[in-house]
Image (tube, helix red, strand yellow):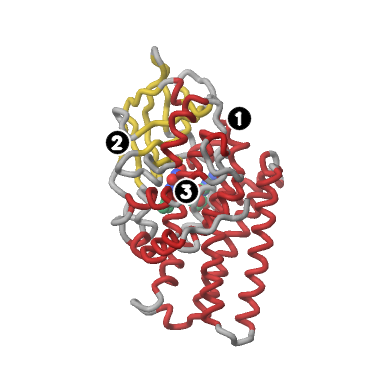
Amino acid sequence: MTAPLLSPELAAWLHDHAEELDATPALAEQVVPQLAAAGLFAIGVPQDQGGSGGTVVDAIDAIAAVAEHSVTSAFVFWGQRTFIEYILQSPNAALRDKWLAPLMRGEYAGATGLSNAMKFLSGIESLQITATAVDDGWRLDGSLAWITNLRKAGFIAAAAVNQADGGPPAIVAFTSEAAGVVRSGDLDLIALRGSNTAAVKLNGVAIDAADLIHANAREYLPPVRPAFLGMQCGLSIGLARASLRAAQTLAGNLRGPLTERIEALRATLENTVDELKAGVADGRFKTAAAPMFKLRIALADIVQQAVQLELQASGGKAYLQGGDQHFARRWRESAFIPIVTPSLTQLQMELQKHAA
Ligand SMILES: Cc1cc2nc3c(=O)[nH]c(=O)nc-3n(C[C@H](O)[C@H](O)[C@H](O)COP(=O)(O)OP(=O)(O)OC[C@H]3O[C@@H](n4cnc5c(N)ncnc54)[C@H](O)[C@@H]3O)c2cc1C
């Protein structure tokens, strides 16, 4: 399957609303239906499961294509598609049968609250949710400080939970309708404000075996991580491509050091993308995390250089209010790249541990 291009309608919608999606929550409820209508959530989902086929690599391409227009929308896409990946890779067929189709159709939002779990596995943080065994399942108590795609119209979210009886940490799903699930208001973000990002509290939320994504987070997460991280790299890839394209246009046909830097960075970007996609496709990152972490760090670095080149190609007019709004938005969007889980700080610590 070749990389799917966005439909002209979706590309126009993203382009026209990119500023509003970043700066206000006004369009937050529209993002999932817009992406679903273009069939994007079915990419990389096997055809025998109702998807459009292809692999996670195709989903990376699609997320990158959306990020070229709007990182807010691309991050929502990542949340939805990553949740879909969780249930595709879950042994719980009933959960998959129940949720896959509504999620691909965008009737429900899928959210991934697994930053806490990723940090827990790296020994940085304890799990924030406790599951206490009751007669017919578990009772969940705790909170998640940050979670995106908590659509007000309804969501299902994944979280890692600590078992009160000492069993292994598990990955579970809970829905917005469950009694005891309390979504905060949207967080007061400096950008990505249309992403339905909020905190969530779980007060005695009842779940049972049907809601279990996996009984053991330590077994489940390492093989899922290449899809999680690879699709997340789609944000960096799309944003860097957009900034480099803008820089090239602004630099025009003038030859000189700036143009050379733009061309060199574009080549580095595309080589890095090829390396990432090859490693996701052949499965090598499932057992070798360090090379993938290095690629995520390299892509984040390329994004920072790309927005710098766009700024330098634009000059003073990039600094004017009402001037080049796309630059100012991309500058804010780019500030998200180093801190999205696993953040560069976390990755650098992991690499240091690997090296030792
Ligand atoms: C817009 C937005 C949307 C988000 N959406 C989601 C979501 O959908 N799901 C989700 O799960 N999360 C989400 N997050 C959370 C996000 O992924 C966090 O930014 C991430 O967890 C980074 O954690 P942190 O703030 O602790 O920063 P980190 O980068 O982990 O660390 C920051 C600071 O803590 C220090 N530090 C970290 N670890 C250690 C250590 N071991 N020892 C000493 N010092 C340490 C560092 O030195 C640094 O100063 C979102 C965040 C944002 C901004």
Dot placed on the residue nearer the N-terminal end, 1 or 2: 2
Residue closer to the observer: 126 or 206: 206
Residue 175 percent across, percent down from the top left: 36, 33
Up/down of 98 relative to 165, above or below = below
Q: Amino acid at mark 1?
A: Glu
Q: Label 3, on which residue?
A: 39
| Label 2: which secondary element | strand
Whether 169 is drawn above or below 248: the answer is above
Q: Secondary structure at mark 1?
A: helix
Q: Which numbered dot is residue 196?
A: none
Q: Three-letter amino acid code at disc 3?
A: Gly
Q: Looking at the rendering, in which quadrant would you find the C terminus?
A: top right
Measured Cα–Cα span from mark 3 to mark 1? 31 Å
Q: Which residue is mark 1?
A: 219
Assign a secondary structure to mark 3. loop
How crowded pointer 3 is (Cα within 10 Å; few <14, some 14-19, many 20+) is rated as some
> How many C-alpha atoms fall within 10 Å of the one at disc 1: few (<14), some, or many (≥20)?
few
Q: Give the residue at mark 2.
A: 182
**N-term mark: 3 or 1:** 3
The residue type indicated by label 2 comes to Val
* Mark earlier in primary sequence (2, 3): 3
